[in-house]
Amino acid sequence: MNTKGLIILLGIPVLTIVSLLFINNIALMGDHPYQTQEDTLQRESSYSQGISPNQKENLKIPTDTEFIELFFNTIQSGNINIALSMMDKSTIQTQDQIDTWVQHFNAFKTVKVLNIEESEKDIWTDTMHKFKVNIEVEIKDIAKGATIPNFGWGEGDNIRWITVIKGEDELWRIKEIATGM
């Protein structure tokens, strides 16, 4: 047997084993980046960490409506961990809450904000605003068989009432995503 034949003969099993180990390692990482409630809560404010006071002065902090669009764009781009960190701590207090949100966000094939309207402006405060948001979603097939089909989201246009609150750091957080006022 020549050298090329020996390399091919030994190379294929080695590549197969390396590939299987790599795939197995990914599978062991789980369906979402946060494995525990503690991990999630530690990252709650991660999207604002590492910004010095000088840098903060030069940054444009998103408005309430820009923040809502940014939140759904983050989900669309597959950054579920960052989307979770953009939610208020009270929304992700338990592992069950975290798992539920991860399931919902992972159910989207696509998600896009179509329109944002102010809602219930008479109850607004400096740190709490509520909006009626028209969101277009396409649902993955895996979500269609859920206990609540599509986790309560319909194909196409969906209306959600979203409450945002402003933290001490002057950044907005998602407080609530509701199907009704």
Image (cartoon, helix red, strand yellow):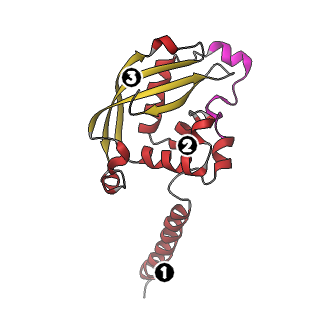
Nearest the viewer among 6 and 146 is: 146
Q: Secondary structure at mark 2?
A: helix
Q: Earlier in the sequence, mark 2 or mark 1?
A: 1
Q: Which residue is mark 3?
A: 132
Nearest the viewer among 133 and 69 is: 133
Q: Which residue is mark 2?
A: 81
Horizontal and vertical percent for residue 40? 63, 45
Q: Which residue is mark 1?
A: 10
- Tag nearer the camera, 3 or 2: 3
Q: Amino acid at mark 1?
A: Leu
Q: Which mark is residue 1?
A: none
- Tag nearer the camera, 2 or 1: 2
Q: Residue at x 47, y 35 (%)?
A: 74
Q: Amino acid at mark 3?
A: Lys
Horizontal and vertical percent for residue 97? 55, 46
Residue at far bottom of view: 1
Q: Which residues are magenta?
A: 43-58
